[in-house]
Image (cartoon, rainbow, N blue to C red):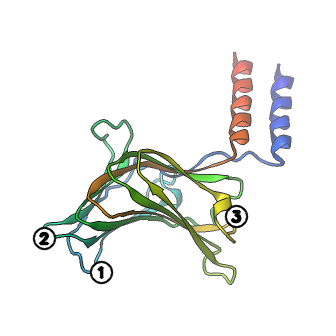
């Protein structure tokens, strides 16, 4: 049986053409503290929060920067960004909650990894448990930051319902995913509402995940 386990592991690596790549957690929103509000509709006025030294097993790079920018609304309007780590009503997971009482707002959450290698991943997945109103979801990536080969590109999706939104690596142009230095996820809303992001991940091809599962089952069988 030991031989079977070894052969299974070798077969998986050969099938993938190299080492296995697992899911990379960009942020599961289980650590940190965000509680910001912007009540000024003047252009470029934003409420911001910069968190340093976060657990890198929960937040890639150990740093998170969040902004709430109210762009339009009557007196008393606001744009809120809050990190909820003790569960939300009707939501089992932790998450970052964006709330708008006004006509428009932009919410940014940014990450600053150092030369993060995502070359074996196939897509970014943004999981939303609450989408009160239609919004635009933007994923912006910078690679080779500070070098002559630095490239930045973004992809935008219109979202009107809760679920998982994929951003395929192939949708981005000219990026070197072996050296990712900046990841930005933006919500642009043009009506009042509530939006909750549960987590952001980079994941490999489904076939890779299947092979990882196969290897795990083989190891479990060996232990049994």
The correct choice, above or below, for 194 with respect to 9 in the image is below
Assign the C terminus to one quadrant of the image: top right
For disc 3, the marked residue is: 178
Instruction: Say few, some or many: other residues with alpha carbon within 10 Å of mark 1 (under 14 / 14 to 19 / 20 or more).
Output: few
Residue 213, numbered label? none
Q: Residue 15: x and y, percent?
A: 84, 41
Instruction: Say few, some or many: other residues with alpha carbon within 10 Å of mark 3 (under 14 / 14 to 19 / 20 or more).
Output: some
The correct choice, above or below, for 207 with respect to 177 in the image is above
* Residue 188 visible to an observer of this rendering: yes
| Residue at the extreme bottom of the image, as rendered | 148
Lower sequence index among marks 2 and 1: 1
For disc 2, the marked residue is: 75
The residue nearer to you, when weighing 5 against 138, is: 138
Q: Is residue 194 left or right of residue 63?
A: left
Of badges 2 and 3, the one in the foreground is 2
For disc 1, the marked residue is: 43
Question: In what element is the residue under mark 3?
Answer: loop
Q: Residue at x 21, y 70 (%)?
A: 73
């Amino acid at each position: 049986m030991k031989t079977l386990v070894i052969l299974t592991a070798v077969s998986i690596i050969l099938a993938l053409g190299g080492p296995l790549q697992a899911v990379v957690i960009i942020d599961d929103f289980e650590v940190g503290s965000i509680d910001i509000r912007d009540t000024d509709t003047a252009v470029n006025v934003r409420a911001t929060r910069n968190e340093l030294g976060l657990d890198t097993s929960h937040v890639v790079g150990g740093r998170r920067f969040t902004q709430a920018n109210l762009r339009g609304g009557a007196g008393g309007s606001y744009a809120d960004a809050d990190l909820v780590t003790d569960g939300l009503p009707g939501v089992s997971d932790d998450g970052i909650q964006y709330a708008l009482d006004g006509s428009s707002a932009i919410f940014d959450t940014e990450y600053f990894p150092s030369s993060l290698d995502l070359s074996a991943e196939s897509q970014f997945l943004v999981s939303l448990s609450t989408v009160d109103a239609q919004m635009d979801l933007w994923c912006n990536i910078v690679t080779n930051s500070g070098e002559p080969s630095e490239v930045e590109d973004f992809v935008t999706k219109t979202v009107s319902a809760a679920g998982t939104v994929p951003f395929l690596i192939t949708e981005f142009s000219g990026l070197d995913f072996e050296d990712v230095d900046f990841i930005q996820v933006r919500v642009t809303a043009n009506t009042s509402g509530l939006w909750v992001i549960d987590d952001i991940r980079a994941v490999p091809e489904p076939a890779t995940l299947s092979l990882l599962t196969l290897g795990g089952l083989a190891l479990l069988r060996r232990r049994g």
